[in-house]
Image (tube, rainbow, N blue to C red):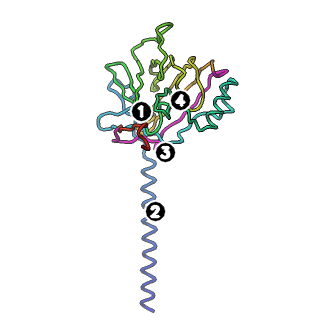
Amino acid sequence: MRIAAALVAVSSLAVVSFAQGKQGKQAQAKQVNTAPPEPAPRWPDGHLNLGSVPGKKGYWEVRPGLGGFPRANDVPFQPWAKAVYEYRTATFSQDSPLVDCKASPGPSFLNAPGFEIVDVPELKSIFILNMAGPHSWRVIYLDGRMHPQGEDVRPTFLGHSIGHWEGDTLVIDSVGFNEKMWAVGAFPNTSQLHLVERISRPNLKSLSYEVTVDDPGAYTKSWSGKWTITETTASKWIADGEMFEYICQDAGR
């Protein structure tokens, strides 16, 4: 009886100790989760830096399901554009230029597996580099230039992008696209496409993106979509991570 009683006492102490340990870990986890997020990096002049800085390098990883775009029923399609969209979705976007490793602008540029934003103040330019598609880059000019006009326009896959800051938000205005690319998933576009993108960084590990699509050749009015990367989303800021080689034409071969 004494041995049995001793075993019961030891067992009870073990249960209490386990419960206390579990509560302690939960309290620590709660404390970690409630800690304020690390602020986004800034340049000496105070303006926001959307990319890496010494001691805090990394890149933005993109996982499938980032989403952020309206349902097809809420998009103001012209009839022909809706038919094209329905065909593309029915065929799982098998004709997408991205499948052939060709570049796409706007939201389609920020594709899996990820991208990096590099601000170069001395050049008055921001470069957005991606690992998907053709492993390409976009240049956002911040030197006050205007878009080319008339015969100076050279329609390209990525268009011509100029930008400016509105507080802590980078505003990117892009025109001059060809009709070979898909800017927003399976949604069609024409050479009249005008994209306005807004990018901000609420804290070190969060990035917010919003785009307004204005294309009178395909839609009856402008429309928009947005997404945010945070510590709790599948897509994340990969601290201390570095861009790696991803050659889509080599995938599966």
Residue nearer the viewer, 186 or 17: 186
Residue 185 pos. (x, y %):
56, 32
Q: Residues within 10 Å of mark 3 (few under 14, many from 20)?
A: few
Quadrant for residue 249, please give it.
top left
Q: Earlier in the sequence, mark 1 or mark 3?
A: 1
| Circle 2: element type | helix
Tag 3: residue type? Ala
**Distance of mark 2 from mark 4, alpha carbons?**
41 Å
Query: Do the residues under discs 1 and 3 have CB atoms within 8 angstroms?
Result: no
Quarter occupied by the N terminus:
bottom left
Q: Which residue is mark 1?
A: 130
* Residue 55 makes an appearance in the image: yes
Q: Which residue is mark 4?
A: 210
Tag 1: residue type? Asn
Of circles 2 and 3, the one toward us is 3
Picture layout, residue 124 above or below residue 148: below
Query: Do the residues under discs 2 and 1 have CB atoms within 8 angstroms?
Result: no
Tag 4: residue type? Glu
Q: Which residue is mark 3?
A: 234
Residue 84 pos. (x, y %):
64, 29
Query: Do the residues under discs 3 and 4 have CB atoms within 8 angstroms?
Result: no
Provide the residue span drawn in magenta.
Answer: 218-242
Q: Which residue is mark 2?
A: 23
